[in-house]
Image: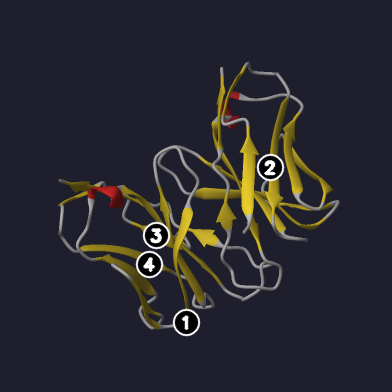
Amino acid sequence: SQTIHQWPATLVQPVGSPLSLECTVEGTSNPNLYWYRQAAGRGLQLLFYSVGIGQISSEVPQNLSASRPQDRQFILSSKKLLLSDSGFYLCAWSVPGGEETQYFGPGTRLLVL
Amino acid sequence: QKEVEQDPGPLSVPEGAIVSLNCTYSNSAFQYFMWYRQYSRKGPELLMYTYSSGNKEDGRFTAQVDKSSKYISLFIRDSQPSDSATYLCAMSASGTSYDKVIFGPGTSLSVIP
C-alpha cells in the first residue's frame, strides 16, 4: 500500500530564516506530487505540482520554491520566510493518468514569528 | 464568483441525525467530484469519488452530483461523534492529474453525543 510522509509535523521559525519541508511517498512509482497551503478557515491553495523528477510547475508567485530530486521526494523551500508564510502545508500524490483523487500527507504546521 | 463555494458552517447536529453537506460550482466543465474529510490538524482523507451526474453510496455516506444545477451533496446517515470534522468538496474537469483539482473551503461539522 502507498504511504506519504511529511516532516517536520510542526515548525516555528523567525521571519527571514530559511525553510525546508520534505515529503516522501512509498509504494508507488512516478507519482504526481503536489504542495498545498491551507490557511486557517480557508481552502487549499495549490502551490506547486510535479509530474516527474526535476519537473516543477508553480501555481502562484511567492517566495517559496519546490524541488523534486528523486522520484518520490518533494521538497518545499524558502530562502527567507515572511510572516504571511505561516499556515498548514500539505503534500499530496496522485496516480499519473488515473483518477483525479489525490492522497494527502499528515501536513506540517508552520508558524513564522 | 468563486469556482467552488461551500457553506463554512459550523454545522452542529445531534448524534444519529442525517447530515447534508453541499457545494456549488460555476465551471460546467467539471466532471470529476470528490469529498474529503479532514480532522483537526490532520491531512484530508478521501471519502468519496464520483464521475459525472448521479449517486454513489458507501456505507453511511452518499454522494450526489447534479451537473445541470452545478450542485453536489454529501449525505451522512446515522451521524456519529467520530464524523466531527471539516468536509471538503473537490472537483476537476478532466480525468488526468494534469488538470488542476479545485477544492472548496470546507464545512465544519460537529456531531453532538
Q: Is residue A26 visible?
A: yes
Q: Is residue A106 above or below residue A86?
A: below
Which element type, helix, strand or loop, lies under badge 1?
A: loop
Amino acid type of the residue that numbered disc 3 sits on in the rendered structure? Glu
Q: Chain of mark 2?
A: A
Mark 4 is on which residue type? Thr
Marked residue nearer the N-terminal end (4 or 1): 4
Residue type, label 2: Cys
- Residue assigned mark 4: B24
Q: Tag 4's secondary structure?
A: strand
- Residue A23, which numbered label? 2
Mark-to-mark CA distance, 2 and 1: 32 Å
Q: Measure the C-alpha gap from mark 3 to mark 2.
A: 29 Å
- Which badge, 1 or 3, comes first in the chain's sequence? 3
What residue did someone put label 3 on?
B5
Q: Tell me the subunit letter for badge 4.
A: B
